[in-house]
Amino acid sequence: MKIHLFAQNGMYILLDVNSGAVHTIDEMVYAIMQIFDGKNDEQVLAVLGEKYDQAELQEALAELHGLIEQELLFAPDIDEPPVFAAKPIVKSLCLHVAHDCNLRCEYCFAGTGDFGHSRGLMTPEIGKKAVDFLIEHGGKRRNAELDFFGGEPLLAMDTVKEVVAYVRQREQETGKKFNLTLTTNATLLDQEIIDYLNANNIAMVLSLDGRKETHDRMRPCVDGSGSFDEIVANAKKLVDSRDGQNYYLRGTFTAYNPDFAADVAAMADLGFKRLSVEPVVAKEAAYALTEEHLPVLFAEYEKLADDFLSRKLNGNGYEFFHFNLDINNGPCVAKRLAGCGAGHEYFAVTPDGDLYPCHQFVGRENYQMGNVFEGLKAHELSAHFRSSHVLTKPACRECWARFYCSGGCHANADLFHGDIRAPYEVGCELQKKRLECALYIQANLASLAE
């Protein structure tokens, strides 16, 4: 598939898949593009000649041929770049400093923090060894990324502090620059921890599911009480302390709250301006999302897109992760093809130092790939991850969204199909709808700027 056409709220949009060019078109060109393949002008004129003026059709066709010459329409296919044949460079690690948690979220893919095994915390020694692994396998790349994760990483704050101190030491010794992130439920944030995180420029991902009733239903404390009030208070304190920057508030929506646009609005109304909500991924659970939910969820994404635009134009906007789409200067070809780099450029490290393709694979023993002491052992598996991209996945090769979603999540594919090259269908449909909404938003903003 070389183009994608869609209409939303009276706007007609044409995406050229290979070039990434986005064209806002009128109803006549929209009709033309249902037929036009770049070589069949006479067929277009014959089919549409009674509905539209012949001269206007010919003028439109001439403009379309001009776009083809500029490779902004029916652009040539993208081939696998040579970089995929090279030895992969490890760019980032997800450091599981805690396989324990003080919440009992119903949908937690980590089994409420223990990832299907015993609860425990990472020692500073293993954390430091992970830093060495990242440096050793990072080649000449200057930038490296480290995410403190769990469970709840603030339960292992002593380890976090020792690892950060070691990172700063190794930066001086190697000339590398580490970008640090910490993902937390925010219940344990106090002023001392906030001051430390700010002083060390650690980006924050904070978990909140939206409205109080939505959040407390799925994210209770161990004793069953709600966590919403405490999280909001602590999150506000942190966000205010860094002038609303260097954080994301991230939620999850389920079958219990298909009206998730209201949850995004609720978080924005609380004063949070950097937001994301993700669809839950689950099998055979009451809260799981299925194909039956898709029409409602599609309508909800459109509602969210309109609210996003309205607030932005009224000067009270917010950022929404899935709508942050740069249609002019997107990622490089390799990133567009392969996405996150799980299993070859990105790994998760357990408290014991074991390596997995990413945080969601942790606990799936057939995906254990080595450890930070002995290095990567599962070289064939790593090569399989590296070669599993949109050009090698049958379901992705002809999908219009392939260069935006990069083939979807490997872990979700494995969960539903036992095959990282067989994408999770419900996730694909939601991803495509989010992309249409993002393109619709960008097209609107571009037209207003003209």
Image: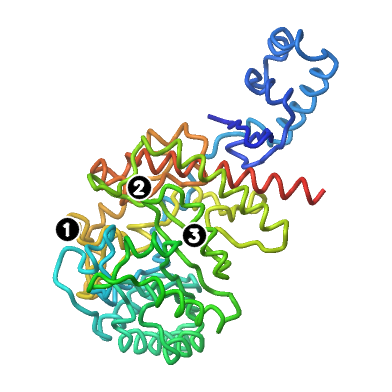
Which residue lies most toward the bottom here? 192
Q: Is residue 99 visible?
A: no
Residue 384 location in percent, x, y? 30, 48
Q: Residue at x 30, y 80 (%)?
A: 127
Instruction: Give the label, 2 or 1, closer to the camera.
Output: 2
| Residue 80 shown left or right of residue 344 in the figure | right
Which amino acid, mark 3?
Ser
Secondary structure, mark 1, is helix
* Residue 23 visible in the displayed image: yes
Query: Dot 1 surroundings within 10 Å: few (below 14), some, or many (20 or more)?
Result: few
Gap between marks 2 and 3 measured at Cα: 17 Å
Q: Position of residue 150 (x, y in %)?
A: 30, 71
Judging by the rendered image, the residue that carries numbered circle 2 is 255
Looking at the picture, how far across and down is residue 321, in whole percent? Answer: 53, 58
Instruction: Report which residue position mark 1 lands on.
Output: 365
Per the image, the residue denoted by label 3 is 276
Amino acid type shown at disc 1: Glu
Q: Is residue 404 above or below residue 340?
A: above
Residue type at tag 2: Ala
Viewer-closest of 341 and 53: 53
Q: Disc 1 or 3, which lies upstream in sequence?
A: 3
- Whole-percent x, y for residue 158 in the image: 31, 89
Mark 2 or mark 3: whose residue is earlier in sequence? 2
Please identify, in this view, whether the residue under mark 2 or under mark 3 is nearer the observer.
2
In the image, taking residue 390 as reference, residue 444 lies left or right, namely: right
User: Regarding mark 3 in the picture, which secondary structure is present there?
Assistant: strand
Indicate the quadrant where residue 424 lies: top left
Residue 108, compared with residue 56, is above or below; it is: below
> In the image, is residue 136 above or below residue 370?
below
Instruction: Say which residue appears at 56% left-offset and 50% top-offset.
Output: 304
* Residue 163 image-quadrant placement: bottom left
User: Is label 2 in contact with label 3 (beta carbons under 8 Å)?
Assistant: no
